[in-house]
Image: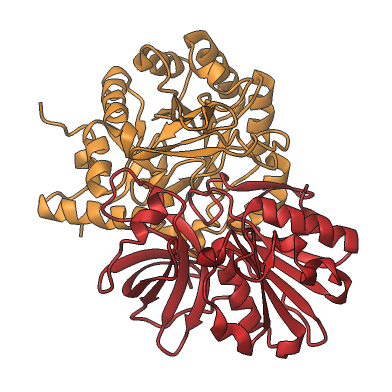
């Protein structure tokens, strides 16, 4: 029985969350396999001659009842820009589910989830899936300004929400690693998870290591295949060069050469 | 019922569709999408005597209708393959072919002797054409004496089907093909990737850590097709056609140009199910053209 699939989905929604982030919802006409936070889909960009390869996106939400998968697509280049032009009613080919999930927290864990940019998607997904009471889950989101933040108020039922913005227009001013949640009592958390720009994750990893707190990050290296054959998305680790697509995208920071 | 079986020297493929080395891992990865036995065979990831970490990231750049790679033969070495991978795939109902790479002739010989012990492996592909390693690799494949030496020495220790994978980065690929035929190659496979380059104009930096890399995908198909046709007309041994095959029509074109077997490569990054669709497409083509056997396609170009 196959574990991974190439499937044409129906696009049922494509809406702008802000100037650069879009929410794309797709529906399957067959039952979805189990999909976990951290796992991703590799999407074909159609009607764009110059775009040859698929583009990987983290899964944001899964609605098994209606067989719907949602992704947050941030415009980063030609491929993602083209994808955000897709209309509801059209088809989208996805290779899925790809990659591995996070180490799930146990019942007595207190966790901090840090998302930057479209990296909020797997963090919110994990908050929802964690099964922890809301007081044990903190979400810290970082962006340049208020306009770059995505409205995630729906997630108040799963976690306490904290914001950092570089210009101070939402939440505390500065980077996520300068936020009081992060600076004041990092040791109060038993697990930290992060997804976002490389620089952000490296800064988080440095502090988490110093505080000796368990920390996993989800990487976004450039990839071609998404299922472990092209060996292009490698990340140097203590176990040698590993594929972000199949050995990750989630890595424990102690396994990375950061 | 149409017959899809083809022979390459003395091994039989249930159909002419195989996967190219470096694009199908060790066949376990594609098995997560489809039954391995649906394809004629798998040219497994390039293997060396010892572990190789490969080149630094970034190793990949998307280009018009294709991509550049500079993986640099990352693999855990032949002993790791024999102990940890071979047992997982030995029962696959398909041809498994090991692609071997060396820095020296001695490396190729040592690798071949280890492959000799593996009953399931009916053929070996000598990679003398990898553009992404500093020593060996393409250095052997771009000169007739180099290609002849590796072929001749491996022939001495290998009795099963020996396929030599050729580089397109040469003045006249038919000369290299004839040279390896003269030293006992049972078949040639072509082409490996074309040496290419990509630059980020804004940053004024190369897109690959190695600056240059190997170009693959539909961008190279017309050149690969021409080379397969030229080589098929220049040698008597069978030819394995490779280069930008994306669909059944592409595969059929390579067979008409003279290929007995085709390798699908980069296409699988775009859609892992493409190889299976190509098998179905070839079958449909044969029915539409009232052909009994896929062998009628080989070299069937009407000029």
Instruction: Estimate the x, y position of residue A17 in percent, counting from the top left.
Output: 44, 70
Give the chain coloured orange: B
Position of residue A240 relative to residue B116, above or below, is below
Residue B75: image x %, image y %?
65, 41
Q: Is residue A231 left or right of residue B282?
A: right
Residue at (45% x, 42% y) in the render:
B20
Q: Is residue B144 above or below residue B253?
A: above
Quarter of the picture holding the C terminus of chain B:
top left
Q: Residue at x 48, y 38 (%)?
A: B61
Q: Is residue B71 left or right of residue B143?
A: right
In the image, residue B2 lies at what x, y percent? Answer: 21, 55
Which image quadrant is residue B51 in?
top right
> Quadrant where the N terminus of chain B lies?
bottom left
| In the image, residue B194 above or below residue B90 | above
Residue in the picture at 64% in, 58% down: A166
Q: Is residue B300 visible?
A: yes
Q: What is the quadrant of residue B230 in the picture?
A: top left
Q: Nearer the viewer, residue B98 or A230?
A: A230
The chain whose colour is red is A
Above or below — where is A215 with respect to B243? below
């Amino acid at each position: 029985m196959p574990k991974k699939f190439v499937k044409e989905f129906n696009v049922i929604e494509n809406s702008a969350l802000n100037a650069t982030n879009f929410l794309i919802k797709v529906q399957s006409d067959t039952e979805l396999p189990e999909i976990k936070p951290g796992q991703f889909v590799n999407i074909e960009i159609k009607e764009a001659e110059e775009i040859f390869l698929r583009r990987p996106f983290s899964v944001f939400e899964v609605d098994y009842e209606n067989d719907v998968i949602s992704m947050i697509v941030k415009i980063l280049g030609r491929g993602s820009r083209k994808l955000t032009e897709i209309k509801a009613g059209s088809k989208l080919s996805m290779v899925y589910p790809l990659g591995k999930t996070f180490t799930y927290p146990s019942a007595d864990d207190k966790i901090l989830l840090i998302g930057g940019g479209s990296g909020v998607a797997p963090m919110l997904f994990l908050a929802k899936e964690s099964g922890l009471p809301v007081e044990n889950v903190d979400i810290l989101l970082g962006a340049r300004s208020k306009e770059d933040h995505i409205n995630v108020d729906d997630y108040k039922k799963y976690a306490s929400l904290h914001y950092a913005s570089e210009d101070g227009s939402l939440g505390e001013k500065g980077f996520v690693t300068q936020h009081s949640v992060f600076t004041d009592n990092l040791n109060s958390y038993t697990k930290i998870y992060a997804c976002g720009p490389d620089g952000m994750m490296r800064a988080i990893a440095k502090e988490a290591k110093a505080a000796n707190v368990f920390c996993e990050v989800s990487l976004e290296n450039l990839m071609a295949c998404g299922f472990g054959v092209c060996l292009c998305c490698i990340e140097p680790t203590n176990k040698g060069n590993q594929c972000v697509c199949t050995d990750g995208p989630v890595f424990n920071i102690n396994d990375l050469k950061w | 019922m149409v017959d899809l079986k083809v022979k390459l020297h003395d091994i039989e493929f249930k159909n002419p569709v195989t996967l190219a080395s470096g694009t199908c891992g060790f066949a376990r990865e594609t098995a997560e999408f489809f039954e391995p036995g649906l394809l004629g065979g798998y040219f497994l990831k390039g293997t060396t005597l010892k572990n190789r970490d490969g080149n630094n990231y970034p190793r990949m750049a998307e280009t018009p209708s294709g991509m550049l790679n500079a993986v640099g033969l990352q693999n855990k070495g032949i002993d790791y393959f024999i102990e940890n991978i071979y047992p997982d795939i030995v029962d696959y109902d398909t041809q498994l072919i090991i692609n071997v790479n060396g820095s020296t002739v001695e490396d190729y010989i040592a690798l071949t002797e280890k492959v000799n012990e593996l009953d399931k492996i009916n053929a070996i592909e000598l990679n003398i054409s990898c553009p992404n390693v500093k020593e060996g690799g393409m250095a052997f494949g771009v000169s007739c004496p180099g290609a002849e030496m590796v072929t001749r020495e491996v022939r001495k220790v290998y009795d099963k089907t020996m396929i030599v994978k050729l580089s397109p980065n040469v003045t006249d690929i038919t000369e290299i093909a004839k040279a390896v035929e003269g030293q006992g190659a049972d078949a040639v496979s072509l082409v490996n990737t074309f040496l290419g380059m990509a630059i980020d104009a804004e940053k004024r930096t190369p897109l690959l850590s190695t600056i240059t890399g190997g170009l693959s995908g539909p961008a190279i198909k017309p050149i690969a097709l021409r080379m397969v046709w030229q080589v098929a007309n220049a040698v008597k041994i069978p030819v394995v056609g490779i280069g930008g095959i994306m669909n059944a029509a592409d595969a059929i074109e390579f067979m008409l140009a003279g290929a007995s077997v085709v390798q699908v490569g980069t296409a699988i990054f775009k859609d892992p199910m493409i190889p299976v669709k190509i098998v179905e497409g070839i079958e449909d083509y044969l029915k539409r053209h009232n052909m009994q056997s896929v062998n009628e396609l080989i070299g069937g170009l009407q000029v």
